[in-house]
Amino acid sequence: MTTSIRNAAFLLLLLTACCATTLACEPNGAKFGYTGSVGPDHWGTLSPNFTQCARGTNQSPVDIWTPGAVYNPALQPLHRDYTVANGTLVDNIFNVGLRFDGGAGSVTVDGKQYRLKQMHWHSPSEHTINGQRFPVELHMVHASDDGNVTVVAMLYRFGRPDPFLWQIQDKLAALYAEGCDAEKGAPVAAGVVSLWPLRLHSHAYYRYVGSFTTPPCTENVVWSILTQVREMTVDQAAALMAPLEQEYRHNNRPTQPMNGRVVQVYRFMP
């Protein structure tokens, strides 16, 4: 048995063990899901607000085919000015998120500053590289003062512990421990979190214009996917999914057609 198969089997075992207190929970009226009649193939028909999920031509995620990615010398480095900030862990029903009510830092894209608002995780990854899907993907969602959105995404394989997640591992356990309590869905204060570990390995990235990967699938989102694949342990990945209902623990939208779009790539040239 290969290492990847063993890791996947262990992750499944961990999540199965977490199911005991969550299977009876209702998903708080969530209007979309990832399987069956509420799955991604049906999102566009679930609500008049979701039609762009079916009709949009610049949707996300996408498969990044690296031989077709175009180097663009006009692209600039990702200037990510993150700091330490008070965070709050939330069970969004369809993912686990960490939101920031105060200043958590910003990223500058094409000369415009976007402030970090929240981050959340998908498992397995939504974006793929040459058809390869990864165990986890992190989305860091930023907004500008004029309402535009940019997302910095990071892909993870199983390996060494992720230093950022070490800071909130006990809080993730508290979010899971809520289980089916009457207060399920209540946020958990994560305290002061350092975002410095997330600034590492950003010397190269892929860039394209797409959409949110959950309904209403709003377009004109600027995506930057770091080329450096990071690592986390199987236990850390399981902890990120454990608070979610069983049907939301595989919360990746399938890749969408490129429809003529081109993925650009930035590489640091010393």
Image: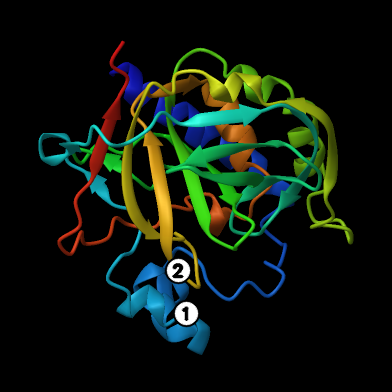
Question: Residue at image x 64%, y 45%?
Answer: 115
Whichever of labels 2 and 1 marks the residue nearer the N terminus, that label is 1
In the image: residue 244, left or right of residue 185: left
Residue 164 can be seen, yes or no = yes
x, y percentage for residue 255?
29, 55
x, y percentage for residue 4?
34, 23
Residue wearing tag 1:
50
Q: Judge the density around disc 2: few (<14), some (14-19), many (≥20) Cα neighbours within 10 Å.
A: many
x, y percentage for residue 176?
75, 42
Find the residue positioned furthest to the bottom: 48
**Could you tell me which quadrant the N terminus lies in?**
top left
Residue wearing tag 2:
217
In the image: residue 261, left or right of residue 51: left
Amino acid of disc 2: Cys
Cα–Cα span, label 2 and label 1: 7 Å
Residue 119 can be seen, yes or no = no
Q: Circle 1 — which element?
A: helix
Residue 248 image-quadrant placement: bottom right
* Marks 2,1: beta carbons within 8 A: yes
Amino acid of disc 1: Phe
Find the residue positioned furthest to the right: 182
Question: Residue at image x 42%, y 34%?
Answer: 135
The figure's colour scheme reads rainbow
- Whether residue 270 is situated above or below residue 179 in the rendered picture: above
- Whether residue 194 is situated above or below residue 143 in the rendered picture: above
